[in-house]
Image: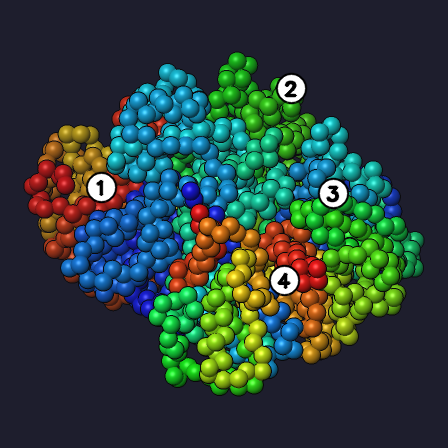
């Protein structure tokens, strides 16, 4: 059966725009803000939010990326490799962090990212922005900024594509 | 029958009369769109104004039931180069000529409209009259005429009414709204209540809405009572709010910005509008005589979200601290491009978010 | 590590040209390429052009390196290698260039090096566009309506589709050998035959069968899109005739008049959605069908490349479609597009709006063919029959239509409105249902005979609006007819676009009398500027059209201007090369610092390109139209093609300085099958005659001989004006030769001006700017280099082995003539083909 597109390029762009405005609403501007994208697609999304902030406020918000594939509690080879380039490690102490991911599902990825962040510093606050919240949480985690709530069945998959990596922008439900 | 358009500066344009044979007074402006004359003529924002169309042939598509933007047109006169006589409603009884007759609105055709537009772009909008005879009396009448500034009162609903749906409860505060707004809200299956602009905070909140829309409307926003601004200042902190056209100007006023009259009004749909945050361009129907004064805008309170790339004017603003935003143009189209429809999608996403967080 | 997408910037661009003129392809590709070359050059790109069309102007542009070569995969590869091309622009050469580049990509081997970037469209999208069906599947997937269709491989599958979809059906070749081959079948008897025939036109023997939607309204929308997805609508145009008649053969009008804003806005976003779908950077033409009864909109054709509509929209709106499209294809954002100073700084990003009406009328050559005893099928259907088109500009529909009729048929008697009185009632009904080339006049005649608007609208599927308008025209004509010679009637008639000549005929007087009456009563045209803001902004417009209102916007440009009378619509014969020759003339006069004014009404050739002249009048070319412009501009000189005898006389009577461009009234007939026609070609500079080369001409092909000519042979000739001439003789000879004994030139030969096509061909093959030299001779500015060229040639030129071959047009498909058509006289276009030796049989 064919995949169903639930967000096209235009609505995906608008969702990111709305998230950006909400981040500014919450943070009273961009002071002490750092965006942390969860690899792979969260990183691209974080950069897009940063681009938007720059267009709107003429400020450059630092962006860093973390790779948590080896950090999840359900991953066999749990280790402490964050996939972080030392040069990219920003000082996050007393900063307002916004974690950016493409899909929020069980919450395990987010938890891994939180663990990782706390290892490298002690931020003022951490908020979570996701493009899609598909439900089925296994952990007490809730997104502060949601592009689109898409209720799904357990056996469905959500496929997020970003232009920079996949050549197009879309969110599809894969049956 | 030969009739004449006299402008306040004394210039006279002659043509043939159509529509109602009445004498009319109004402020004349020009419109450069090539489609949607019926929607434009019936848009209540033209209360007290006359329009000259740049599109040289007007009326070729007749009059359609689905193209009304209000039940009673408030426009004062229609000036065209060539009038087409086509009836397209099912009874084949209504064309533009008969439509204007029916609503007692005079029209003038066989006018050198390009000359008139080139004149108006230099002078700006002018007081004008359509008459049978050009004489001192007609000119005196024109000079003596004071055009109303009570257009909102003229066009907006005096009483609340509902347009029920099954979705979010949206309150539209009516300053002379065009039907396009209700049409789009219908697309979202919103449960709509339209309230008069004289409504109070209490009345609004008692209805327990999920979001507020400040409608489009005619005239100068500064002619409205201060109570409107007070109302907006309260509502914008309570729930998502979207301002359109006059509603956009009012949101700006309510947040300390000032409004200026434009030297030459713009009525058309061919200017690029840029959404600043994404740098994307799109086109939308515009009809504006006023603009937010750039210098008066408090950057700590408001963002500029959209600009017209031709004249640089502010086309959208957003509150920094609340999900309240507004646009100068008409995202509902009717007439005009549909690509700005996304503004409504944004609004409904914001409303959904608000409802979810407050439930 | 996060990276923004950075594409390696292209530096060296190859444009693939559109090839020879044919049905559906006039000079628009070449005009488009020619226009963008200087801009791209100025932006720092090195540009190369490949085309096999000897009439190409782009190949001669100083802003590019031109290659006159056959359009083959090998030649494209060779040029890519030799010119180090890193980007290829296929979107300016129509379907043919698209196919060729697609083929090059599929045949690209590692040994060929790095494949250049495809500009404007990704290689994979280009492939899908070429395929057609794949693209339409995707268009359907994004929720747009297309008509039900399927590809079939044999008669059995075709029969299956026949049962599924039911008649009428549209049948066309999948992967066709050439252009459009759409045919509509509404009779069961025709089905097998058409399927069979169309299968033969497919490279892959596949046939596409779709449900026909005859009778619906057709609307064309033109949009541009940049790499960031910013889209802008350039314009839209509607066809008066319903679907079932090829859009090229229909009267069409812009802006759209009879479709509501709501429907137009739907079409607009659908066109944007398709541009997004294929990730286009450039221009897109989408054809829609609109069913007024159901409100349904169907996408019927998608053309993501420069085509006739793009050129026409540029002329109709003043929006520089080609300059914008080329830069978008190079990867610029629409906000970054560079335009020359003549444009308003916001022109590229403002959607153009029109405050005038433009009617496009097709031009058919049936009359010319019938004059030669060739009968063709005049009935209009889904296969194009018109060979060209003319535009009429006005401020009302009737005015624009009248001017279009006058532009399209200025020398065709059958377009006199009284002509139709002879048609019998039965014929009239037949032709209403099965329209022919005289469609508009027939509709008028039907109204005259008392048919009601309602019944005509139902019978023809033409919007009622048009019948109301035609009724107005009848009223005007009747009022002119009835009245005695009268200034008010004249004013009314002029306002609706009637020419002095026509009014004179009604009043049984001559056009001079009409002109006098007009002048006495101050009935003068007012010229309105054509510019894309519809009066919103002050403009520096250089395009004007006449109307009869209050304000005139056109002022004479200068005392020393030269007015050039354009060739008008493309007709069979040397029409394709007339555009070339006129453009070369404009370009050369401009180079010599003359202020030039062009009058023309054909958007498909380069003559109306804004940078070729200082001022453009978009007008019919009848005597009265030209006279009015002459009155306004008072030009220093007027350049008129030699076949416009009446105009030349009238201008000379006025005391104007007329320069006659030598040209025969009719394009010459070609030699018979067994014959060779030889031509001694020479240049006359006003004083001396300079022989060039001898050419041999056999049916459909011209080659250059390798022999010297003694200039003394030409001593006795006397000629009226400078130019290129041919001394012609025919020999019973059906083989190519390299030398031919010259006959006694005084006895067995005749003299004629060199046809434009030969000028274009010899210019390229001999590498001498012959066209420009004629212009320089006219104004007494031949230079030393020219004299050296002429001295050097003396017939001993080592000629390039390129023959000029007439386009092998599929007349059977388009016109169904009852006998063979002389390809010299009724040429559609030409290409060059290399040949091996002088004595080969002429086949490739």
- The residues tagged by marks 2 and 4 sit, at their Cα atoms, a distance apart of 46 Å
| Residue B338, horizontal then vertical, whole percent | 61, 51
- The residues tagged by marks 1 and 3 sit, at their Cα atoms, a distance apart of 60 Å
Q: Which mark is residue C450?
A: 2
Q: Nearer the viewer, mark 2 or mark 4?
A: 4
Residue carrying label 3: B68
| Residue C619, horizontal then vertical, whole percent | 52, 46
User: Image point 84% across, 68% down: which residue?
Assistant: B230
Q: Earlier in the sequence, mark 2 or mark 4?
A: 2
Name the one closer to the observer, C410 or C28: C28
Residue carrying label 4: C537
Q: Are marks 3 and 4 in contact (CB under 8 Å)?
A: no
Q: Are marks 1 and 2 in contact (CB under 8 Å)?
A: no
Do circles 2 and 4 both sit on a common chain? yes
- The residues tagged by marks 3 and 2 sit, at their Cα atoms, a distance apart of 35 Å
User: Image point 65% across, 31% down: which residue?
Assistant: C468
Do circles 1 and 2 both sit on a common chain? yes
Q: Estimate how packed mark 1 is, as few (under 14), some (14 to 19) or many (20 or more) residues with alpha carbons within 10 Å.
A: many
- The residues tagged by marks 4 and 1 sit, at their Cα atoms, a distance apart of 49 Å
Q: Estimate how packed mark 4 is, as few (under 14), some (14 to 19) or many (20 or more) residues with alpha carbons within 10 Å.
A: some
User: Image point 60% across, 68% down: which residue?
Assistant: A144
Q: Earlier in the sequence, mark 4 or mark 1?
A: 4
Q: Is residue C582 above or below residue B219?
A: above
Name the one closer to the observer, B289 or C453: B289
Q: Is residue C225 above or below residue C592?
A: above
Name the one closer to the observer, C366 or A26: A26
Residue carrying label 1: C805
Q: Nearer the viewer, mark 3 or mark 2?
A: 3
Name the one closer to the observer, B245 or C40: B245
Q: What's the chain of the residue with tag 4?
A: C
């Amino acid at each position: 059966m064919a995949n169903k597109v639930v967000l096209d390029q235009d609505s995906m762009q608008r969702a990111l725009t709305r998230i950006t405005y909400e981040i500014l609403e919450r943070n009273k501007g961009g002071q002490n803000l750092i965006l942390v994208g969860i690899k792979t697609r969260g990183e691209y999304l974080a950069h897009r939010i940063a681009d938007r902030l720059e267009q709107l406020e003429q400020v450059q918000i630092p962006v860093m990326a973390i790779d948590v594939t080896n950090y999840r509690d359900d991953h066999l080879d749990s280790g402490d490799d964050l996939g972080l380039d030392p040069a990219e490690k920003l000082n996050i102490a007393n900063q307002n962090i916004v974690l950016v991911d493409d899909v929020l599902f069980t919450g395990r990825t987010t938890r891994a990212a939180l663990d990782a962040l706390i290892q490298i510093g002690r931020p003022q606050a951490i908020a979570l922005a996701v493009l899609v919240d598909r439900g089925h949480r296994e952990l007490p985690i809730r997104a502060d900024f949601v592009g689109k709530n898409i209720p799904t069945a357990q056996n469905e998959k959500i496929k997020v594509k970003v232009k920079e990596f996949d050549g197009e922008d879309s969110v599809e439900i894969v049956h | 029958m030969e009739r004449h358009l006299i402008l306040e500066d004394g210039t006279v344009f002659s043509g043939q009369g159509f529509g109602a044979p009445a004498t009319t007074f109004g402020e004349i402006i020009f419109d450069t769109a090539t489609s949607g004359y019926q929607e434009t003529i019936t848009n209540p924002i033209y209360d007290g104004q006359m329009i000259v169309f740049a599109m040289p042939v007007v009326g070729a598509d007749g009059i359609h039931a689905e193209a009304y933007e209000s039940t009673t047109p408030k426009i004062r006169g229609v000036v065209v180069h060539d009038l087409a006589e086509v009836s397209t409603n099912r009874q084949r009884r209504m064309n533009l000529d008969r439509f204007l007759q029916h609503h007692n609105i005079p029209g003038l055709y066989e006018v050198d409209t390009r000359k008139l537009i080139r004149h108006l772009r230099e002078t700006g909008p002018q007081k004008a009259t359509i008459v049978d005879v050009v004489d001192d009396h007609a000119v005196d009448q024109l000079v003596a005429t004071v055009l109303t500034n009570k257009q909102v009162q003229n066009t907006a609903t005096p009483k609340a009414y509902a347009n029920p749906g099954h979705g979010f409860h949206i309150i539209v505060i009516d300053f002379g709204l065009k039907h396009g707004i209700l049409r789009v809200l219908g697309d979202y299956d919103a449960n709509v209540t339209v309230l008069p602009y004289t409504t109070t905070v209490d009345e609004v909140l008692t209805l327990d809405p999920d979001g507020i829309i400040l409608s489009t409307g005619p005239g100068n926003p500064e002619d409205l009572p201060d109570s409107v601004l007070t109302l907006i200042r309260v509502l914008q902190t309570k729930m998502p709010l979207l301002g359109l056209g006059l509603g956009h100007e009012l949101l700006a006023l309510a947040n300390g910005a000032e409004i200026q009259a434009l030297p030459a009004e713009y009525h058309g749909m061919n200017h690029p509008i840029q959404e600043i945050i994404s740098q994307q361009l799109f086109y939308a129907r515009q009809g504006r005589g006023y603009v937010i004064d750039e210098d008066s805008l408090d950057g700590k309170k408001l963002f500029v979200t959209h600009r017209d790339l031709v004249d640089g004017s502010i086309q959208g603003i957003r509150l920094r601290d609340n999900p309240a935003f507004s646009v100068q143009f008409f995202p509902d189209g009717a007439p005009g491009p549909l690509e700005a429809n996304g503004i409504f999608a944004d609004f409904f996403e914001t409303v959904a978010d608000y409802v979810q967080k407050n439930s | 590590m996060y990276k923004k997408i950075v594409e390696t910037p292209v530096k060296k661009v190859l444009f693939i040209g559109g090839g020879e003129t044919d049905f559906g392809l006039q000079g628009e590709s070449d005009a488009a390429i020619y226009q963008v070359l200087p801009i791209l050059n100025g932006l720092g790109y090195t540009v190369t052009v490949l085309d096999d069309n000897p009439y190409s102007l782009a190949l001669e542009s100083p802003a590019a390196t031109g290659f006159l070569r056959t359009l083959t995969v090998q030649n494209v590869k060779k040029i890519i290698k030799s010119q180090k091309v890193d980007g290829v622009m296929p979107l300016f050469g129509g379907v043919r260039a698209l196919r060729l580049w697609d083929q090059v990509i599929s045949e690209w081997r590692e040994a060929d090096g790095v494949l250049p970037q495809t500009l404007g469209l990704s290689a994979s999208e280009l492939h899908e566009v070429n395929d057609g069906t794949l693209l339409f599947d995707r268009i359907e997937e994004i929720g747009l309506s297309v008509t039900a269709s399927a590809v079939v491989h044999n008669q059995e599958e075709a029969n299956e589709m026949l049962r599924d979809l039911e008649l009428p059906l549209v049948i066309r070749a999948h992967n066709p050998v050439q252009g459009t081959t759409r045919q509509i079948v509404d009779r069961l008897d025709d089905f097998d035959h058409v399927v069979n025939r169309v299968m033969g036109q497919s490279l892959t023997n596949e046939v596409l069968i779709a449900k026909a939607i005859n009778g619906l309204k057709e609307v064309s929308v033109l949009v541009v899109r940049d790499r960031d997805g910013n889209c802008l609508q350039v314009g839209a145009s509607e066809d008066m005739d319903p679907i079932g008649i090829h859009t090229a053969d229909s009267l069409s009008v812009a802006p759209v008049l009879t479709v509501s804003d709501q429907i137009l806005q739907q079409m607009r976003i659908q066109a944007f959605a398709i541009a997004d779908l294929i990730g286009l950077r450039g221009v897109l033409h989408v054809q829609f069908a609109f069913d007024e009864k159901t409100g349904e909109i169907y996408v019927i054709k998608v053309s993501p490349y420069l085509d006739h509509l793009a050129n026409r929209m540029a002329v109709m709106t003043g929006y520089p479609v080609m300059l914008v499209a080329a830069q978008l294809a190079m990867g610029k954002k629409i906000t970054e597009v560079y335009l020359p100073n003549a444009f308003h700084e916001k022109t590229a990003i403002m959607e153009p709006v029109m405050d005038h009406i433009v009617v496009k009328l097709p031009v058919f050559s049936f009359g010319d063919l019938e004059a030669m005893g060739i009968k063709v099928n005049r009935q209009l259907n889904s296969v194009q029959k018109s060979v060209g088109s003319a535009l009429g500009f006005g401020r009302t529909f009737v005015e624009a239509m009248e001017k279009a009729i006058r532009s399209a048929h200025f020398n065709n008697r059958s377009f006199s409105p009284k002509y139709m009185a002879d048609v019998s009632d039965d014929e009239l009904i037949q032709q209403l249902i099965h329209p022919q080339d005289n469609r508009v006049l027939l509709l008028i005649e039907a109204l005259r005979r008392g048919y009601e608007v309602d019944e005509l609208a139902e019978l023809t599927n033409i919007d009622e609006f048009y019948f109301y308008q035609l009724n107005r025209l009848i009223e005007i004509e009747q009022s002119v007819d009835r009245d005695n010679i009268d200034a008010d009637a004249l004013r009314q008639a002029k306002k609706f676009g009637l020419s002095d000549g026509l009014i004179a005929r009604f009043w049984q007087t001559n056009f001079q009398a009409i002109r006098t009456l007009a002048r006495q009563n101050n009935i003068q045209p007012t010229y309105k500027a054509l510019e894309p803001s519809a009066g919103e902004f002050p403009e520096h417009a250089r395009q004007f059209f006449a109307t009869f209102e209050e304000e005139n916007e056109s002022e004479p440009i200068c005392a020393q201007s030269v007015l050039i009378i354009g060739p008008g619509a493309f007709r069979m014969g040397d029409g394709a090369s007339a555009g070339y020759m006129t453009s070369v003339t404009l370009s050369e006069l401009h180079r010599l610092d003359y202020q030039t004014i062009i009058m023309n009404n054909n958007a498909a050739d380069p003559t109306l390109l804004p940078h070729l002249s200082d001022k453009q009048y978009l007008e019919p070319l009848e005597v009265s139209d030209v006279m009015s412009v002459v009155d306004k501009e008072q030009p220093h000189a007027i350049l008129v093609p030699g076949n416009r005898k009446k105009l030349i006389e009238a201008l000379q009577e006025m005391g104007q300085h007329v320069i006659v461009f030598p040209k025969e009234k009719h394009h010459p007939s070609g030699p018979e099958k067994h014959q060779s026609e030889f031509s001694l070609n020479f240049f006359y500079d006003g004083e001396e005659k300079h022989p060039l080369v001898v050419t041999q001409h056999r049916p459909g092909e011209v080659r250059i001989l390798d022999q010297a000519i003694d200039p003394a042979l030409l001593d006795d000739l006397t000629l009226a004006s400078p130019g290129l001439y041919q001394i012609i003789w025919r020999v019973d000879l059906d083989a190519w030769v390299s030398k031919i004994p010259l006959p006694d030139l005084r006895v067995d030969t005749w003299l004629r001006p060199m046809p434009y096509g030969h000028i274009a061909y010899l210019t390229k093959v001999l590498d001498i700017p012959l066209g420009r030299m004629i212009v320089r001779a006219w104004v007494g500015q031949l230079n030393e280099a020219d004299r050296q060229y002429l001295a050097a040639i003396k017939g001993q030129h080592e000629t390039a082995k390129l023959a000029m071959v007439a386009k092998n047009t599929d007349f059977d498909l388009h016109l169904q003539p009852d006998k063979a058509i002389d390809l010299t006289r009724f040429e559609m276009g030409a290409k060059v083909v290399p040949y091996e030796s002088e004595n080969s049989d002429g086949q490739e």
